[in-house]
């Protein structure tokens, strides 16, 4: 094949990243552009679809220049990105609204309403307890009926960008299969929109686009987008998958029983499983298709959990910040060094890492908390308790995964994301979960996974799993300590119990916040 390079773009909540790969999985160049978040009012955080588009074409143009690759040698363009939120288009693919994702909380009353009345139906059919589409469409329908009426199709921002690149009209709209269940509107097991859910929520099913496989060629790059991207007209554009399935693929984890810990802004624990199964007992797991046919992912995540490290650094490390030569990374290394001297359990401190509500299982009124500290505890105790708390949350998730899939043996976790650089944190997680933790020699798992999909779609790669295995190498392994694992189980049990114990407190605090907010406005 003369065309031997793949361009993969990851549309994230904080940045747009574009990378170019050859057929051996080598990263030849990458570029990143910060996203623009618009604050329209209290709780109203949105993105412009056209900002995403301009950032995407700029990234593609820059990465082609950086790599020195001839545009004629590009085999495909493929996309990945965050898995929730919606944007609408009219009949000519013009946006009817801003892109609203989980950071935008204006739809929360509708989320609470549909989950109080239809949570079992949505979880049984879609496999999610934290829908990120149905509630937002209902919010648009009820609060902005003019926008709802003018919208021909709702979709995620990734599909909006792809549609602009290939010159789509609304009748050609699509939504790739891995992210569809996150909308809360699908019959996930059968890969179709659920008429039962749409009817129950009074959402017009004809406003939802067709569902397509991750490897589908959705069209070819049109002349004008090709010009601004610095590419040739006619390059195939591939559907791709949202970021978590791409992480599985790009980390070599598309083997049933493998788990990926994405230690990033939204810490997520994602297991590769062999079937769709709604978590009706714990109501914790999100279940959706993998990019590989016949495989599924069972996932949990912590909203903004990775931001807590930065918050702690900024608010509690200002003194050390002046003393240390390197600003950010050195502070984290210093915190890790001191926290490593603290025994398991941070000498009795328990931290709640859900500073913006709990998503899996859903409990939007939960907030952050420290319990058990005394005058003898130091800053490093509090920092270690943050690291341990996210590990405790993952342990709760692992318990749910094991019970939902008792026939599968889970033996190891591959850790990716910025947090994977912390050797201490990896060891803590290995001890808490009782599983070995493997750190990869590369960090570009999301775009690499997307590139594998893009290569499969145009015939460069025959088997995505075999390709993934060939591209991935392990750099470090942390083995669990049985003694420390046994100590940590008591803390995990206390962590599970504290949410029930604090629930009335959280509910009261939520009411007080609303009273204060109402008084201000």
Image (tube, rainbow, N blue to C red):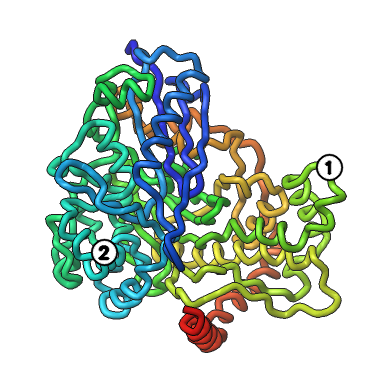
Closer to the camera, 393 or 233? Answer: 233
Residue at mark 1: 325
Which residue is at 50% across, 47% downward?
14
Instruction: Determine if residue 252 is in view.
Output: no
Instruction: Determine if residue 20 is in view.
Output: yes
Label 1: element kind: loop
Among the 4 quarters of the image, the one containing residue 362? bottom left
Which residue is at 38% across, 52% downward?
83
Horizontal side of residue 453 vs 511, given as left or right: left
> Quick one: label 2 or label 1, which is nearer the N terminus?
2
Which residue is at 45% across, 14% downward?
69
Task: Estimate the x, y position of residue 467 in percent, counting from the top left.
Answer: 42, 29
Residue at mark 2: 140
Closer to the camera, 169 or 259? Answer: 169
Closer to the camera, 397 or 229? Answer: 229
Label 2: element kind: helix
How many numbered circles are shown?
2
Question: Which quarter shows the N terminus?
Answer: top left
Task: Estimate the x, y position of residue 55 in percent, counting from the top left.
Answer: 43, 36
Residue neighbourhood size for the residue with mark 2, other residues' Cα within 10 Å, grouped as few (<14), some (14–19), many (≥20): some
Q: Of tags 2 and 1, which is closer to the observer?
A: 2
Q: Is residue 433 above or below residue 171?
A: below
Task: Estimate the x, y position of residue 375 in percent, counting from the top left.
Answer: 84, 78
Among the 4 quarters of the image, the one containing residue 215? top left
């Amino acid at each position: 094949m003369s065309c031997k390079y793949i361009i993969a773009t990851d549309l994230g909540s904080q940045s747009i990243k574009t990378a170019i790969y050859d057929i051996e999985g080598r990263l030849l160049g990458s570029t990143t552009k910060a996203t623009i978040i618009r604050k329209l009012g209290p709780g109203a955080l949105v993105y412009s679809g056209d900002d995403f588009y301009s950032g995407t074409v700029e990234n593609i143009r820059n990465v082609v220049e950086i790599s020195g690759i001839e545009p004629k040698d590009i085999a495909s363009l493929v996309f990945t990105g965050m898995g929730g939120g919606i944007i609408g288009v009219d009949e000519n693919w013009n946006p009817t609204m801003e892109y609203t994702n989980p950071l935008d909380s204006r739809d929360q009353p509708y989320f609470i309403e549909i989950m109080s009345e239809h949570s079992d139906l949505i979880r049984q059919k879609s496999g999610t307890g934290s829908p990120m589409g149905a509630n937002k469409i209902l919010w648009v329908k009820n609060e902005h009926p003019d926008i709802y009426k003018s919208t021909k199709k709702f979709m995620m921002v990734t599909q909006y960008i792809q549609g602009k690149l290939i010159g789509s009209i609304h009748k050609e709209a699509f939504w790739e299969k891995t992210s569809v269940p996150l909308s809360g509107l699908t019959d996930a097991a059968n890969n179709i929109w659920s008429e039962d859910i749409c009817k129950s929520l009074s959402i017009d099913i004809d406003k939802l686009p067709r569902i397509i496989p991750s490897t589908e060629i959705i069209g070819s790059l049109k002349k004008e987008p090709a010009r601004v991207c610095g590419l040739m007209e006619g390059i195939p554009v591939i559907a791709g998958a949202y970021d978590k399935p791409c992480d599985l693929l790009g980390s070599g984890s598309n083997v049933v029983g493998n788990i990926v810990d994405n230690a990033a802004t939204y810490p997520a624990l994602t297991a590769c499983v062999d079937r769709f199964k709604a978590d009706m007992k714990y109501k914790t797991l999100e279940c959706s298709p993998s990019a590989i046919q016949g495989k599924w992912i069972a996932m949990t995540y912590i909203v903004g959990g990775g931001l807590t490290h930065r918050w702690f650094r900024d608010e509690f490390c200002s003194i050390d910040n002046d003393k240390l030569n390197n600003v950010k990374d050195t502070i984290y290394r210093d915190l890790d060094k001191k926290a490593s001297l603290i025994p398991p359990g941070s000498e009795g401190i328990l931290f709640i890492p859900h500073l913006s509500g709990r998503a899996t299982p859903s409990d939007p009124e939960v907030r952050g908390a420290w319990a058990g500290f005394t005058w003898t505890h130091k800053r490093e105790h509090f920092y270690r308790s943050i690291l341990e708390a996210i590990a405790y949350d993952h342990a709760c998730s692992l318990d749910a995964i094991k019970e939902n899939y008792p026939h599968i043996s889970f033996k190891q976790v591959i850790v990716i994301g910025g947090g994977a650089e912390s050797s201490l944190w990896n060891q803590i997680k290995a001890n808490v979960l009782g599983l070995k933790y493997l750190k990869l020699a590369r960090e570009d798992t999301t775009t690499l996974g997307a590139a594998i999909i893009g290569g499969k779609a145009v015939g460069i790669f025959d088997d995505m799993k075999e390709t993934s295995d060939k591209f991935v190498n392990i750099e470090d392994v942390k083995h669990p300590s049985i003694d420390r694992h046994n100590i940590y189980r008591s803390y995990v049990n206390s962590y599970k119990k504290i949410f029930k114990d604090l629930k009335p407190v959280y509910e009261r605090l939520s009411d007080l916040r609303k009273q204060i907010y109402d008084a201000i406005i």
